[in-house]
Amino acid sequence: MRDTHGGDTYTDLLACEDVLRFANAAISGTGQREFRSGAAEQRLTLDFLHDYVRINYRDLYAASLALDVNDHNAARIVHGLLSDPGEPGAAALDRRTEGALVSQRLAHMPPQRVYRLFRRLAAERVNNRRTRAVIARWISRRRDLAFDAVKYRAGLTAAARHAHLRQPGEISEFCFTPPHRAGFFATPLLETYRAAHYSMEAAYELPLSVGEGFAAKHGVPRKEFLSRARASATGGELLRLDRSLRGHGLEGADLRRAGLTRLCSYVLALPVAEREERREELTSALRAAARRIAGGQAGTWGPTAAVLDDSYSSFGSPVKRNRPLAVALACHFVLAELSVRYTAHWVSGHRDALTVRPEGATPLAETILDALEDGPERLVVVSDGYDDGPPVPAALLDAWRTRVDPGHRTAAVHLNPVMDADEMEPARLARSVPTVGIRDASALPSLVELARFGEGRSGLSELREHLERRVAAYIADVDEKPTVQEVR
């Protein structure tokens, strides 16, 4: 039902707000302790939001897999869709589209998380035909199943057993027979793993994390192992490997392959003196990662000013150390690549991005005023949304939007890396400036697009259209034919 002006009804606007609240929480929340709230509060909030949106807006719940929700919440969404078939007649995507979304999202998640999800489904005895098909399809599309058998053997074994899968070639024998008791394998990697039980030379050809266990078993000094095994490191192991190599006096790893936000966390964990010493190397790696994110959009944004929060609360928590500050630092480098002219304003007044650290108060209002003096086309605020005088940023931004720039000559968005458990969404700066959750800077360009729905001027119908376009683009290259045989 529409109102007399042809827009969405008030109920639809509230529904739009509910879905956006869930999307923001699913992008930024991980159920872990934050600076101002504990893990229990975070988990309770996420539990409620997942149940509420899945039951009331199942189609939008599934469609959120095409957004930039973090892996923790993506796994929860997949679990919810597979374990709950939904009420008859409830709003839902057709089964084929929902299944394609699940398959595509699982394909983009780290394999260890996917195997953890499959083991949870097995533990809860979620074993319907659809679940078995999803597991079979995902395993059939793994590029190197022998690698998975070696690195994630327990997870692959549990998934195959739960879905009644007959694994191809020697994978089944490897998974269900102790490898050191089996005969020779024709598959090179499987044979290398078997041989590594008896020879350390074979262990150097295994994935780094697997080879480390054999090095300990054979009594090989860690320095000797690292010096020879560094070439086998994956992108996710680079940062840990770099620290270990340098700790043993060896040449560090090539950090240019690392993801930007994780690389920022690594940089912030270094002493300031070491960052200064390695300035050229670290800056080069950070810019390379930012250029990969910007891609074809590099240099397409007009003049941009950023307000970046490096106050004490950007420390995060002991379990998410420096995470909010790492997101702000990563956004800084991405914005520099996207914009034709870019200025950064750290709330501490710091001018050297490489040496920022969480300290001091949060004078957001003053810093926002400084940023607006640049006359940007776009204002981006990356902050947890808390100020030493909470009403000041809201009053300032509302007055600016209504009296100084009612025509929206300057687009403004607030990116918040922290979920407020009490509000069930990232804390807002002001109603006049949309707030979007953010966990990884790689999602920055698409999150800025999503932010327009948080201004209160777009309703549920427009949000549905946006999600439909995202879903269509997301599943465009999904092949629905699994190749792993299911045992009937």
Image (cartoon, grey):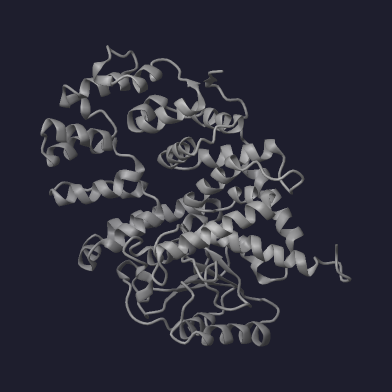
451 and 388: which is toward the camera: 388
343 left or right of 238 in image? right
Residue 118 location in percent, x, y? Answer: 47, 36
Q: x, y (%) of residue 345?
A: 44, 76
Q: Is residue 461 left or right of residue 421?
A: right
Coordinates of residue 329 in the picture (x, y in percent): 40, 65
Q: Residue at x 41, y 53 (%)?
A: 289
Residue in front for this viewpoint, 209 or 293: 209
Q: Quadrant of the N terminus?
A: bottom right
Quadrant placement of the C terminus: top right
When the figure is inspected, residue 174 is found, relative to residue 10, above or below; the finding is above
Q: Is residue 264 visible?
A: yes
Image height of 410 relative to 447, above or below:
below
Image location (x, y in percent) of residue 359: 32, 77
Tell me which residue sits at (38%, 67%) in the image: 325
Compared with 369, 198 (above or below) is: above
Total numbered labels placed on residues in the image: 0
Q: Is residue 218 left or right of residue 260?
A: left
What is the residue that sits farthest to the right in this orientation?
Answer: 4
From where the camera sits, is residue 438 visible? no
The residue under the point 52% across, 87% down is: 392
Q: Nearer the viewer, residue 286 or 182?
A: 182
Residue shown at the point (12%, 49%) measured from the top left: 249
Could you say which quadrant of the image residue 478 lies in?
top right
Image quadrant where residue 112 sits:
top left
